[in-house]
Image (cartoon, grey):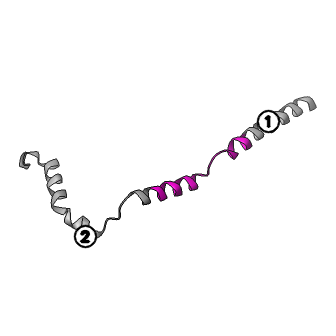
Amino acid sequence: MKDMFIKYLWILLIVACIFALAGCGQVPLADRVIDQHDNSKQESTTQTETDSIGNMKTIGEALGCVFAPQTCKK
């Protein structure tokens, strides 16, 4: 009985060590999300509300073509 307990204890210890070593090499998810957010902020240009309003006609025409293709200009 004692030998079986020692075997299970060793197996548990080895599995715990594997999990501990595997967890050490990974970057936390929050840091990856923050890094991606920072990179996308630098690459993109800021769009103001007036830029969106200026595109309303084009957006409306595109939506109209999606839902009523017979009304679109070729």
Mark 2: which secondary structure? helix
Residue 23 versus residue 43 in the image, above or below = above
SS assignment for the magenta stretch, majority: helix
For the C terminus, the quadrant is top left
The magenta segment: 19-39
Mark 1: which secondary structure? helix
From the top left corner, tell me how far across and down residue 40 is, in percent: 43, 56
From the top left corner, tell me how far across and down residue 8 is, in percent: 83, 33
Q: Amino acid at mark 1?
A: Ile
Residue that carries the numbered disc 1 in the rendered image: 14
Q: Amino acid at mark 2?
A: Thr
Q: Is residue 25 left or right of residue 43?
A: right
From the top left corner, tell me how far across and down residue 59 is, in percent: 19, 57
Depth order, front residue of 56/48: 48
Residue 22 inside the magenta-drawn segment: yes
Q: Residue at x 89, y 33 (%)?
A: 6
Residue that carries the numbered disc 2 in the rendered image: 50
Residue 20 versus residue 64 in the image, above or below = above
Depth order, front residue of 39/9: 39
Depth order, front residue of 18/39: 39
